[in-house]
Image (tube, rainbow, N blue to C red):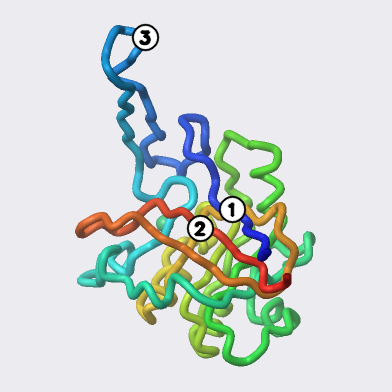
């Protein structure tokens, strides 16, 4: 049996969201306890809350929307890179140290951010580990098609535009808000399926890793 790791965070009203984005509202609006035949909930949230995928149009004018992303980029072999805890930004130097094999198409960074999910930190953390613009250039040049990060943005809080633009302009998928706290660095198969929202700049996703080891 191959082991399956759910790297998605649970969507709740208490999850941290990007400052200025609407909070998540998940509310039961039809209730059996009120004599109705079924329970029905209503969901209101940013398309960029929790585990989610960015579409190019998020930062690139005229870019493609979430339902146009090639599913081939979202599913396939992936490598989880363990980023040392003292690293605050993933730049070229960190990537050169990471020992990424040539030809790797999907890279997920396990940083100290993942501990925030274990602690169920409700407040948004501005000092999360992200990819620097030169790191993004490096990933594009090395043919990476999907970059995953274990907090809500692939780009640093203080300067979110350049990293996003470099990746999204090159057609690299950004998978954000994954929880890698229970996943060891190594090789896996990624299945990342964002909701097929028409015209959206992002979409919540269920993402899982399947271990290559028996
Ligand atoms: Zn996003």
Circle 2 SS class: strand
| Contact? badges 1 and 2 (CB < 8 Å) | yes
83 or 163: which is nearer to us? 83
Circle 1 SS class: strand
Q: Is residue 46 left or right of residue 136?
A: left
Residue 4 percent location from the top left of the image: 62, 59
The label nearer to you, 3 versus 1, is: 3
The label nearer to you, 2 versus 3, is: 3
| Residue drawn at (69%, 71%) of the image | 81
Q: Is residue 116 above or below residue 92?
A: above
| Residue drawn at (33%, 65%) of the image | 55
Query: Pointer 1: what residue?
Result: 6
Q: Determine which quarter of the picture holds residue 199.
A: bottom left
Residue 12 percent location from the top left of the image: 48, 33
Q: Quadrant of the C terminus?
A: bottom right
Q: Which mark is residue 207?
A: 2
Q: Which mark is residue 49?
A: none
Measure the C-alpha gap from mark 2 to mark 3. Answer: 33 Å
């Amino acid at each position: 049996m191959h082991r399956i790791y759910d790297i998605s965070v649970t969507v709740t009203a208490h999850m941290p969201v990007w400052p200025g984005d609407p909070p998540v509202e998940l509310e039961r609006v039809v209730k059996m306890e009120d004599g109705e035949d079924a329970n029905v909930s209503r969901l209101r949230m940013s398309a960029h809350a929790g585990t989610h995928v960015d579409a190019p149009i998020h930062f690139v004018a005229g870019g493609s929307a979430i339902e146009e992303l090639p599913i081939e980029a979202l599913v396939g072999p992936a490598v989880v890179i363990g980023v040392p805890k003292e690293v605050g930004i993933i730049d070229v130097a960190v990537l050169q140290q990471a020992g990424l094999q040539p030809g790797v198409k999907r890279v997920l960074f396990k940083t100290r951010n993942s501990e925030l999910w274990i602690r169920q930190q409700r407040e948004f953390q501005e000092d999360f580990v992200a990819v620097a613009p030169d790191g993004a250039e490096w990933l594009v040049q090395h043919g990476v098609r999907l970059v995953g990060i274990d907090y809500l943005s692939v780009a640093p809080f203080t300067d979110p535009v350049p990293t996003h633009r470099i990746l999204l302009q090159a057609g690299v998928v950004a998978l954000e808000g994954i929880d890698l706290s229970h996943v060891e660095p190594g090789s896996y198969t990624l299945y990342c399926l964002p909701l097929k929202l028409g015209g959206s700049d992002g979409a919540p996703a269920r993402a899982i890793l399947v271990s290559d080891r028996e």
